Amino acid sequence: MSLIDKAHDKERLAAALLLACLRARVTESAEGLTPELLADVDWDSFLRLAIRHRVVPAVRHVLEPLAGAIPRQSWENIRDAALSFAAANERWMNELEHLLLGLKKNGVPCLALRGLPLSQQLYGNIHSRQVSDIDLLVHPADAARSMAVISTMGWMPMFRLDAVQTQAFIRFRTERAFMRHAEHLTVDLHWRSMPPAFSLVSDEALWREAQAPVSDHVRGPALRTAHLLLHLCAHGNKHGWNRFAYVLDLAMALRRSGPADLAEALAIAEAAGKREAFVFGLILCRDLACVEVPDEACASSRAGEGIRRVQRFLLDPCSVWGRLGQERPLLRYMLERGRDRARYYADVMLTPTGIEIEKISLPRPLWFLYYFVRLGRLAIKAVRRTRAL
């Protein structure tokens, strides 16, 4: 066996243990995690995978009772990584509270999506989920004002846009990132919770039925349970379920929801013509995370191969990560209706990116020209790729 094959076998074993930890976190049972299984693990590979899949706090929670069966230095590395993420979450929480307060003072209603509120809602505290950014949702009419407020609070927006470009950006895009490079912090400001092709519940419903804050720490309202299930599934679909964290979050939400919440979420998805997209997430959580889901809820005739594709991707160390590395082959499972698939490909082909909007400032009557700018850039890229071959 070559060194490459041996390395891949170690990575596969590490990925298999990561999946076992995910199941143990969801089911609160570590029966499958025997000392014999832990003995052959390459712990450096395991920790790298846990960080990449954003599940380090869950891994620490599951393995802590078994720490005696793990090499001391390896366990200390896992524990230290989890403590580092917990400390980062404290910093994130301070920033989130500051942002929510600043937006509120400027009369901007705001919903905090995923991130720390989700950690509190699903895991009981802000330290048990690996958070990579802050996601805020505002109304489209408040997007420009929100960008100005966040900029005055010391965050640098991605793309340098004038006032007209900013309005074009709001028209064509769904979110904008703000960063503090020195602190490695990012805020994603959304004025649409999901790209339309992937959305399973309308933003109007999210706003209308948002509930009281999940804790005293998070001042803004939270998504109600049925909407949270739909939103987490749409988020996983959007990213092709390319991280264990997406499966874990939806599985924990399903475990904490009741039959009425699941029935309501299914009814909303079906009314939107997107039941299959939601069922895909349910089957994924049932098969990968061992969540109990009613058979009638998972009735589907075409999800099987998609589920196997996701599992192969998550467990294969040779999987290609990055944009469209996993999403595109799954589109026929995620996008049930032909018009959703057409909308997705139209968005990819025609919708101008932030780079293209930044390059040229067009008055509102000429915004249609951004479509040609987009097509022109795609054509140039295609020509360059052809010449490179």
Image (cartoon, grey):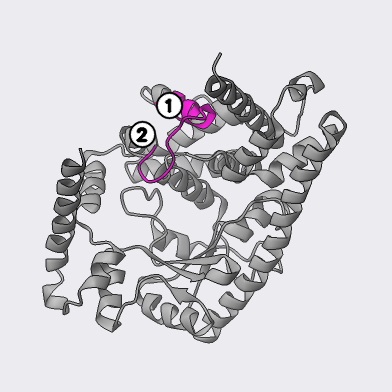
Q: Is residue 280 above or below residue 197?
A: above
Instruction: Name the image quarter holding the C terminus.
Output: top left
The crowd level at tag 2 (other Cα within 10 Å; few <14, some 14-19, many 20+) is: many
Q: Are marks 1 and 2 in contact (CB under 8 Å)?
A: yes
Amino acid at dot 2 = Leu
Residue 115 placement: quadrant: bottom right
Task: Provide the secondary structure element on which disc 2 rests.
Answer: helix
Which is more N-terminal, label 2 or label 1? 1
Of residues 198 and 385, the one nearer the viewer is 385
Q: CA distance from mark 1 to mark 2?
A: 8 Å
Tag on residue 330? 2
Tag on residue 6? none
Residue 1 placement: quadrant: top right
Residue sitting at x 77%, y 38%: 74
**Residue 164 magenta:** no
Residue 156 located left or right of residue 42: left
Q: Is residue 293 visible?
A: no
Amino acid at dot 1 = Arg
Q: Is residue 136 above or below residue 298?
A: below
- Give residue 263's position: percent from left, percent from top: 50, 39
Residue sitting at x 67%, y 72%: 94
Q: Which residues are magenta?
A: 306-325
Tag on residue 309? 1
- Give residue 237's position: percent from left, percent from top: 42, 42
- Give residue 101's position: percent from left, percent from top: 59, 80
The crowd level at tag 1 (other Cα within 10 Å; few <14, some 14-19, many 20+) is: some
